Amino acid sequence: MKRHELTDEQWELISPLIPRRRARTGRPAKDPRVMLNGIFWILGTGAPWRDLPERFGSCKTVHRYFSNWRRLGVFAKIIEALQVKLDASGLIDWELWCVDGASVRASRAAAGADKKVSPATRTSRRTTHWAAREAGLDRSSTWSLTVRALPWPSK
């Protein structure tokens, strides 16, 4: 078995969730395991689709399978099945949660936008302390060490 490819045990677990495709062109359909291995190779390496090794077939074909399976929700079904199996084994701690960095927005300034702040979005130190107190944060929390009044240019 090569890197980024499914083992036989892994394939047996998820193979019922992969839709079987019937060829419409007269050629036989591609092996879904090979297509999935190609998708995992791309996702695992971060390489562009055109750099997909030849052992997986055409990069256009693998990408088409990826797009179709994503549209059909196949990957969501696979994740759900794996979560059910891990939960049944007691290997998932539902009290633990993480934030994926891909879903956290950067500030406008991080993307090169104008760094000026409109008067509507300005906050005062008094407002910040009030909001922290309402949120139940202790005055000795680390936020009080980092919060400081910023001088705003007057117009």
Image: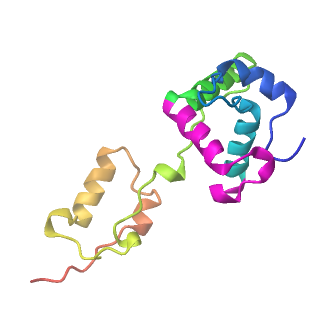
The quadrant where residue 5 appears: top right
Instruction: Report x, y in % for residue 136.
Output: 37, 44
State the quadrant of the N terminus.
top right
Residue 47 seen in the figure: no
In this rendering, is residue 91 above or below 47? above
Instruction: Report x, y in % for residue 92.
Output: 68, 27
**Residue placed furthest toward the right:** 1
What residue sits 79% from the left and 27% below the top?
11
Total labels: the figure holds 0
Check residue 155 for magenta coloring: no
Instruction: Report x, y in % for residue 47.
Output: 67, 59
Provide the major secondary structure of the magenta segment.
helix
Check residue 52 for magenta coloring: yes
Instruction: Report x, y in % for residue 19.
Output: 63, 22
Q: Nearer the viewer, residue 142 or 40?
A: 40
User: What segment carries the magenta color?
Assistant: 45-71
What residue sits 63% from the left and 43% below the top?
61
Q: Is residue 102 left or right of residue 7?
A: left
What residue sits 64% from the left and 55% below the top?
49
Q: Nearer the viewer, residue 63 or 99?
A: 63
Residue 43 seen in the figure: yes
The quadrant where residue 154 appears: bottom left
What residue sits 86% from the left and 28% below the top?
8
Q: Nearer the viewer, residue 22 or 93?
A: 22
State the quadrant of the C terminus.
bottom left
